[in-house]
Amino acid sequence: MTAANKNKRFKAKHQRLVLVVVALIALIGAGLLATWALRNQASYFYVPSEMLEAPPAPDRAVRLGGMVQTGSIKTDDDGVTIHFLVGDGKETVPVAFSGIVPALFVEGSGVVAEGHLRRDGTFQADNLLAKHDENYMPRELENMTETEVKQTVAETYQ
């Protein structure tokens, strides 16, 4: 083997090593960037008893889930802001929300509120997600027979 062939072979190995190192650095950088971006987007889920036991930092985006307490929904004079209590059977947390509430949002129903805990202990909701049970039936289908419901559902998939 000549000296020229040894130099070419060494250079090719060296190039592959550099390529592997650059690829590893790029993967690590992408992973760190994704972790940093998701850290700000992650939203932790709390139930009222957990929120009162170990409250999240004020202004940290979290989700509060539980049942809307019966008799707790109060609407402000502006007609847009509502206040209500969310409970889990052990504790309750006061919630304030400004906006249009979902159609399924009623007293005694499940709700997930996305927002942050204010310094005064009230949960400021930016978004409400109302839950329904397994017996939920859309209003459009309530007065139909089972056959009509199946036909309507089939037509929507065509």
Image (spheres, helix red, strand yellow):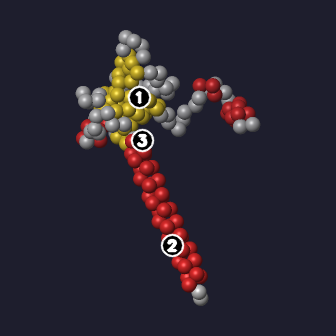
Pointer 3 with pointer 1, Cβ within 8 A = no
Q: Earlier in the sequence, mark 3 or mark 1?
A: 3
In the rendered view, tell whether residue 41 sits above or below residue 152. Answer: below
Which marked residue is nearer to the observer: mark 1 or mark 2? 2
> As shown in the figure, which amino acid type bears the numbered disc 2?
His
Taking depth in this image into account, of 135 and 9 the one nearest to the observer is: 9
Disc tally is 3
Q: Position of residue 113 (x, y in %)?
A: 40, 32
Q: Residues within 10 Å of mark 1 (few under 14, many from 20)?
A: some
From the viewer's perspective, tell me whether residue 70 is left or right of residue 13: left
Q: Position of residue 126 (x, y in %)?
A: 41, 28
The residue wearing badge 3 is: 41
Q: Secondary structure at mark 3?
A: helix
Taking depth in this image into account, of 123 and 38 the one nearest to the observer is: 38
The residue wearing badge 1 is: 126
> As shown in the figure, which amino acid type bears the numbered disc 1?
Asp
Instruction: Indicate the quadrant containing the N terminus: top left, top right, bottom left or bottom right.
Output: bottom right
> As shown in the figure, which amino acid type bears the numbered disc 3?
Gln
Pointer 2 with pointer 3, Cβ within 8 A = no
Q: Position of residue 63 (x, y in %)?
A: 38, 37
The residue wearing badge 2 is: 14
The residue at the far bottom in this view is 1
Which residue sits at x=24%, y=41%?
A: 53
Measured Cα–Cα span from mark 2 to mark 3:
41 Å
* Residue 8 in sight here: yes
Pointer 1 with pointer 2, Cβ within 8 A = no
